């Protein structure tokens, strides 16, 4: 096997290991978000009855963040120091491999979907023009009434399906090129300006990221729908505080909805989606306004109770998972009697007079930005190669994985090919085998180390592999 092939194999192996760790994080983070959502369901109904949607919308944002921060994964790492699926039986590893491949394809598919939507909106914007002067005058007035601190650009175009707000950094409002009354423009602009003012587009994008990562979890899709509904209700209530008349406001919204075909987009805040959801939204807004606003202490109490219950449940779930996982692993693991003959010889010595005739300093920079490095060297007879220094702290583990290839199929004897690490004092710790070898070295003293190889055989040898360090 050539060095190029060895390098490709190890890079694929390392990449797949990274994907498995990412999938481990995704599984536990998805579970964390589900625990948070379970507590939100009854609490949101209670908050709606109390008449304060701000807390429900805030908690939904917390749940989205919970799907992106690997709290449970970090707790498991704290217990054990390993990933969720480290040291699992072969059957479990096969299932994990299949699931990782499926998740990766699903993740790429979701990314492609959002990218296509992004390109579609960009094409629509490219065909738009700055709004007419009469629309700009009304928009300027609405910005003052809504208390917007920044200028929001208004565009019009024939390809825009429905009034919407778009853009996280450079927010804009897109209007279909049609005739509007002044009151209709006020309703549209005030509503979409509230979306920009409350940074709803940022949370929509954050939810899209969570949907890409947790595409397999139906709870995330429900959270996305709830986020859309509560953001619309939240904006409706703010606009009603400005316009006062709920009947006039929804009459204008219904008339606007009758003009345009409803169309859902995952990258913008549209004024409406379909008449069924609009009707449900109207009923909920009327109900919330009728019940009145709950007091600030009660609203704070709801948020505190949610955070305490969710945190306690996540901690308990993490402990339960950890114990169950360990028990399952122990039950599935078979004890294998190792052969009495040692396949790999681990030795330690002080390198006072090198066994090789010539050393070659490779000047390879290791572990500067990552904890995994690959290497590939050609060693002539009775030569050695040594890397540049890298710092390792006490307690960390250095793992080596090595593949070898001999010219003309010559085979080295045990002891003739050595791979290991050397500290600043010249003390070597190495493994030796005829061909492929693996080794783990636990660092007993912090300091600078080097990776080295020695070829004491009569033949030229190719050697390639990886070196990692982890605590």
Image: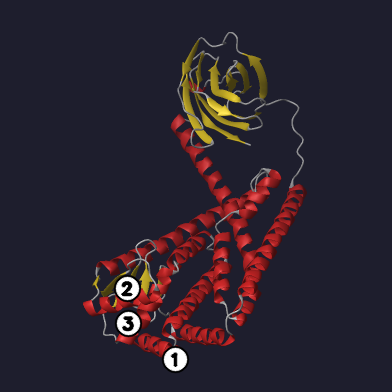
The circle drawn on residue 185 is 3
Q: How many marks?
A: 3
- The reply to whether dot 1 and dot 3 touch (C-beta < 8 Å) is no
Work out whether 221 lies above or below 430: below
Query: Residue 126 or 422: which is nearer the viewer?
Result: 126
Q: In the rendered image, which residue does mark 1 sit on?
A: 247
Identity of the residue drawn at 57% across and 49% down: 20
Q: State which mark lies toward you, 1 or 2.
A: 1
Query: Residue 131 or 469: which is nearer the viewer?
Result: 131
Q: In the rendered image, which residue does mark 2 sit on?
A: 174
- The reply to whether dot 1 and dot 2 touch (C-beta < 8 Å) is no
Q: How is the image coloured?
A: secondary structure
Occupied quadrant, residue 114? bottom left
Left or right relative to 240: residue 342: right
The circle drawn on residue 99 is none
Query: Residue 388 or 302: which is nearer the viewer?
Result: 302
Occupied quadrant, residue 413? top right
**Which sits earlier in the primary sequence, circle 3 or circle 2?**
2
- Label 3, label 2: how many angstroms apart (C-alpha)? 12 Å
- Label 1, label 3: how many angstroms apart (C-alpha)? 16 Å
Q: State which mark lies toward you, 3 or 2.
A: 3
Work out whether 466 lies above or below 261: above
- Label 1, label 2: how many angstroms apart (C-alpha)? 25 Å
């Amino acid at each position: 096997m050539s060095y190029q092939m060895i390098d490709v194999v190890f890079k694929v192996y390392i990449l797949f290991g990274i994907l498995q760790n990412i999938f481990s994080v995704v599984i536990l983070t998805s579970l964390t978000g589900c625990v948070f959502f379970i507590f939100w369901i009854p609490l949101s109904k209670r908050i709606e009855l109390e008449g304060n949607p701000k807390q429900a919308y805030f908690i939904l944002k917390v749940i989205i963040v919970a799907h992106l921060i690997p709290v449970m994964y970090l707790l498991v790492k704290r217990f054990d120091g390993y990933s969720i699926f480290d040291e699992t039986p072969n059957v479990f590893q096969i299932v994990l491999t299949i699931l990782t491949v499926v998740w990766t394809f699903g993740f790429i598919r979701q990314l492609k979907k959002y990218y296509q939507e992004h390109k579609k909106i960009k094409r629509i914007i490219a065909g738009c023009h700055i709004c007419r002067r009469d629309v700009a005058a009304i928009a300027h007035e609405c910005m003052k009434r809504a208390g917007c601190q920044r200028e929001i650009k208004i565009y019009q175009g024939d390809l825009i399906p429905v009034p919407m707000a778009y853009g996280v950094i450079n927010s804009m409002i897109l209007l279909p090129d049609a005739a509007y009354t002044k009151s209709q423009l006020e309703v549209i602009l005030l509503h979409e300006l509230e979306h920009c003012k409350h940074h709803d587009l940022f949370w929509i994008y954050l939810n899209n990221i969570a949907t890409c990562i947790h595409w397999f979890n139906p709870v995330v899709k429900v959270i996305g729908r709830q986020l859309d509904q509560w953001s619309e209700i939240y904006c409706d209530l703010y606009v009603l505080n400005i316009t006062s008349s709920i009947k006039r406001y929804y009459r204008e919204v219904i008339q606007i909805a009758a003009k345009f075909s409803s169309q859902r987009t995952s990258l913008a805040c549209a004024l409406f989606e379909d008449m069924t959801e609009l009707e449900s939204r109207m009923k909920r807004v009327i109900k919330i306004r009728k019940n009145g606003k709950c007091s600030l202490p009660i609203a704070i109490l709801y948020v505190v109770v949610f955070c305490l219950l969710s945190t306690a449940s996540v901690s308990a779930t993490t402990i339960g998972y950890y114990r169950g996982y360990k028990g399952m692993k122990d039950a599935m693991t078979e004890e294998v009697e190792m052969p009495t003959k040692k396949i790999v010889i681990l030795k330690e010595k002080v390198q006072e007079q090198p066994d090789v005739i010539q050393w070659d300093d490779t000047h390879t920079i290791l572990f500067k930005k990552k904890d995994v490095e690959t290497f590939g060297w050609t060693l002539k007879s009775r030569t050695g190669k040594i890397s540049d220094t890298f710092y390792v702290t006490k307690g960390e583990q250095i793992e080596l994985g090595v593949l070898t290839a001999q010219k003309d199929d010559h085979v080295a004897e045990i002891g003739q090919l050595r791979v290991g690490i050397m500290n600043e004092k010249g003390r070597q710790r190495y493994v030796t085998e005829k061909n492929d070898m693996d080794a783990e070295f636990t660092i007993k003293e912090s300091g600078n180390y080097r990776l080295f190889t020695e070829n004491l055989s009569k033949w030229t040898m190719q050697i390639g592999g990886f070196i990692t360090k982890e605590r």
